[in-house]
Image (tube, rainbow, N blue to C red):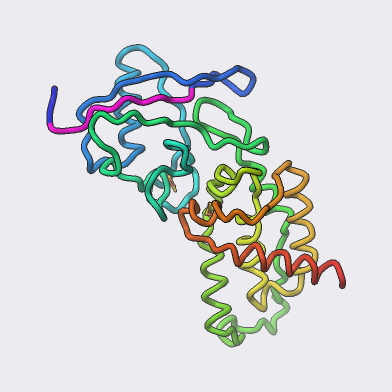
Amino acid sequence: MSGKGMNLTLKIWRQKDAQSKGKMQTYKVNDISEHMSFLEMMDVLNEQLIAEGDEPVAFDHDCREGICGMCSLYINGEAHGPDRGVTTCQLHMRMFNDGDTIYIEPFRAAAFPVIKDLVVDRSAFERIQQAGGYISVNTSGNTQDANAIPISKHAADEAMDAATCIGCGACVATCKNSSAMLFVGAKVSQYALLPQGQIEAADRVKNMVAQMDLEGFGNCTNTGACEIECPKGISLDNIARMNRELIKASVK
Ligand code: SF4
Ligand code: FES
């Protein structure tokens, strides 16, 4: 069936498993609606591949509404593709034109090894968050009502902004050094700004940064590409805050 949709050439990274060498392969999809999301376009390709008896392309996804951080494609050389402030699942095909060739690769970083095709292992992020540990909550019976703890509007807003990080890894994939500083900066900041986060603050930042280094992420050289490609607009200020928290923790 031919319609008014776009006909596209897709160059996609295929890799059987973590051990195999991968390569780009070319596919064609036709009659793609501009209203489709990028992942819906990938679904069309996969249905086509299955119908032809080929193996579908593996890619990560879950919520498909920009909140889980699972989708992770590097599209035409940009994490989450050409649009700003959106994840791959929120990227619309209207960002592309009929006849385009689209390059689709996994997020690349030594600390994010490819598992299969476009799926990478981002468990390093989970280990960093685990290293951050817990926050102490007084449950002894004289628990303070959270609403009775004064927090300035500014601190609350900044903490909330930091907490919008969905752990997608676009910052790492974008950074020429594969640095995870924007992610870790956000995770440190969301607690550092709130009174509830103070008790373990020093250990938290030290342990998270140590785990980040252990996982093999690179250093931050203040290029700022991560901030531009981050689908949640996480600010570089969070990296500065993390560095300040680390200095504070090391002189304690
Ligand atoms: S800082 Fe932004 S790009 Fe990095 S993991 Fe969080 S949401 Fe994704
Ligand atoms: S699938 Fe959940 S953020 Fe894209």
Q: Residue at x 37, y 49 (%)?
A: 83
Q: Residue at x 55, y 52 (%)?
A: 226
Depth check, front residue: 98 or 183: 98
Compared across the picture, whether 212 is left or right of 125 comes to: right
Residue 98 spot, x, y in % from top left: 23, 32
What is the residue that sits farthest to the right in this orientation?
A: 251
What is the residue that sits farthest to the top in this orientation?
A: 53
Q: Residue at x 64, y 56 (%)?
A: 222
Does 186 sit above or below residue 50?
below
Does 242 sit above or below residue 170?
below
Chief secondary structure of the magenta portion: strand
Residue 92 spot, x, y in % from top left: 30, 44
Quarter of the image for residue 4 reads: top left
Q: Quadrant of the C terminus?
A: bottom right
Q: For residue 6: magenta?
A: yes
Residue 159 spot, x, y in % from top left: 57, 71
Q: For residue 226: magenta?
A: no
Q: Quadrant of the N terminus?
A: top left
Does 38 sit above or below residue 163?
above
Q: Which residues are magenta?
A: 4-13
